[in-house]
Structure formats: structure tokens, C-alpha cells
Image (cartoon, rainbow, N blue to C red):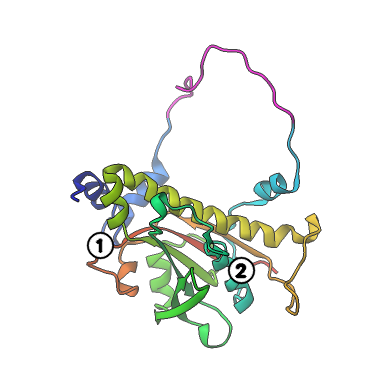
Amino acid sequence: MSTPEFDRFIEASRLTSVVLDRFLNRSQYWDQGPDRLSIFDQAAGEQALPAVDDRLQQLFAARQSSRTFNDTPIAHKTLAELLAAVGVAGSRPLVPSAGGLDPVQTYAFIRRGEGELDGTVVRYLHHEHSIAPVAQMPSADRCRQLFSLDCEGDPALMLAFVVDPAETLGKYGERGGRFLIQQVGHAMQNVGLRIADSQTRPILGLRNSLPGSRNSQKLHGYILGGVLDELMTTLNLAHTRAVLVGGYAIGVSG
């Protein structure tokens, strides 16, 4: 099924090294203008709701963006925990999928990792909870360019979220494009909450480790809004129907 409007949106929002400066300048120098009434304000009375301060709400509040990274490698167990956030519990995917079509794929760029994973790019096979090698990591300078990294130090790990839009667009037409973006957003929120959980476990009295394993690492990171589509060449997906939607930079804080 042809979806020309979605194709035009992807092409218009494609980010390459050629247009990167224009994208950064636009976002940096954009002027919101004078304060004005919100289009969402309605002439109606407000009603206060009861305060919420349970463990889950505290976890939501703990999620934050951090752009300072040290040189600590990502442990194998920590990588497993992060990827499990977008995996499968029993037979149920943790990222909801319109029509059960399961279009989201996660790739891990392991800049600093344990053992043979150090300096590799892997694909996460979320149904099997396993990883498969894809490529060697690009150079440090090329990584900073590909992920448009704006941070102090280099993150130990970058996640890239890619979709195969064919079935979703085939079933839902142009509307399916919204579903694809929603699903990647849900995957990134899952990762963000896993990072927040690594910071709050001692505070909230949660278990610090799985049976027989050492304590989990404390993580921090931020969502990447400027990942270059040139990244698809590293993933061997250039000139395919796959679409790069977003990324996450992650490091260890202690």
C-alpha cells in the first residue's frame, strides 16, 4: 500500500551531516515570542485532585536527563537490564504494538563494555532476549557526529530505535505513521524508567541485584533528538525501507 504522506514526512525530517548545522541553528535560536494565552485554556473552573506520592510516582519523578558521563564500562548485566525494558515478559511484549505487528528494533552501540562486547554494535532480539553482532563501533569522533552528542565525556552506550514501517502502514495507512512514533516513544520511556530505577533502588527499598549477581550500576543518560540517518549505514540498513526514529545516550554515574 502506498503511503506518500508518511514518505514525505520521513524525507522532510531526515537528518544528515549536510543539514545538521541548519537543524541545530533552528533549535538553538528559535524564539517562542511573547507570552500569550494557551490554546488549551478554557473558561471553566478547576478542581484539585488528591496528591499522589506512591513508589511509581517517585520513579516517574526520578527520571531526568543527564549529559555528563565518566569512563566506566557498561556491565553485561546492566546491558541485559536496559534491553529487557524493551523485551518480552512471558509472551507479552513490553512495548505495545498496533495490531501486534511488532515493528520496533533496538540496536546497542557499546562504546565501553565488558569483554568481547566492548566496541561492538549489536541488535537486540527482544523475543529471545539475546543479542546478535552487527558491526564494530565507529571512531569516537564519528560517534559524536552520528549521534549529535552534546555532552561532557562519551556515553558508554547508545541505543538506536529503528522501525520497519511496511506492515503498520499497510494495515493502517498514513495513520500508522503516528503509531510507529508512539511505539518508539514508549520504548524510550521504558529505558528512561529503567535508568531512573537504577538511581532510586536504595531510596525506595528495592532489591539491588538479581540472585547470585552483584549490585546493578547506577545509570544516567538522555534522549537523543539529533541522530543522523547516516547511522543506518553502520547498521547495514541504508537504502532499505527501515526508518531510524530515535536514540538514547547512557552512561554510569557511580
Residue 130 in the figure: left or right of residue 8: right
The three-letter amino acid code for the residue at tag 2 is Glu
Stretch in magenta:
33-50
Label 1 CA crowd tier, 10 Å (few <14, some 14–19, many 20+): few
Dots 1, 2 in contact, CB < 8 A: no
The three-letter amino acid code for the residue at tag 1 is Arg
| Residue highlighted by disc 2 | 81
Disc marking residue 67: none
Q: CA distance from mark 1 to mark 2?
A: 29 Å
State whether residue 224 is above or below residue 39: below
Is residue 62 a member of the stretch shown in magenta? no
Asked whether 184 or 26 is in front, the reply is 184
Q: Position of residue 176 (x, y in %)?
A: 33, 46
- The quadrant of the image that shows the C terminus is bottom right
Residue 73 in the figure: left or right of residue 27: right
Asked whether 233 or 152 is in front, the reply is 233
Residue 205 visible to an observer of this rendering: yes
Residue at position x 63%, y 17% from top? Answer: 46
Is residue 43 a member of the stretch shown in magenta? yes
State whether residue 80 is above or below residue 244: below
Count of numbered marks:
2
- Give the overall secondary structure of the magenta segment: loop
Q: Position of residue 12 (x, y in %)?
A: 25, 48
Q: Position of residue 183 (x, y in %)?
A: 44, 52
Residue at position x 48%, y 77% from top? Answer: 131
Residue at position x 74%, y 77% from top? Answer: 214
| Residue highlighted by disc 1 | 241
Location of residue 230 by image quarter: bottom left
Q: Assign a secondary structure to mark 1.
A: loop
State whether residue 107 is above or below residue 176: below
**Which residue sits furthest bottom?**
116
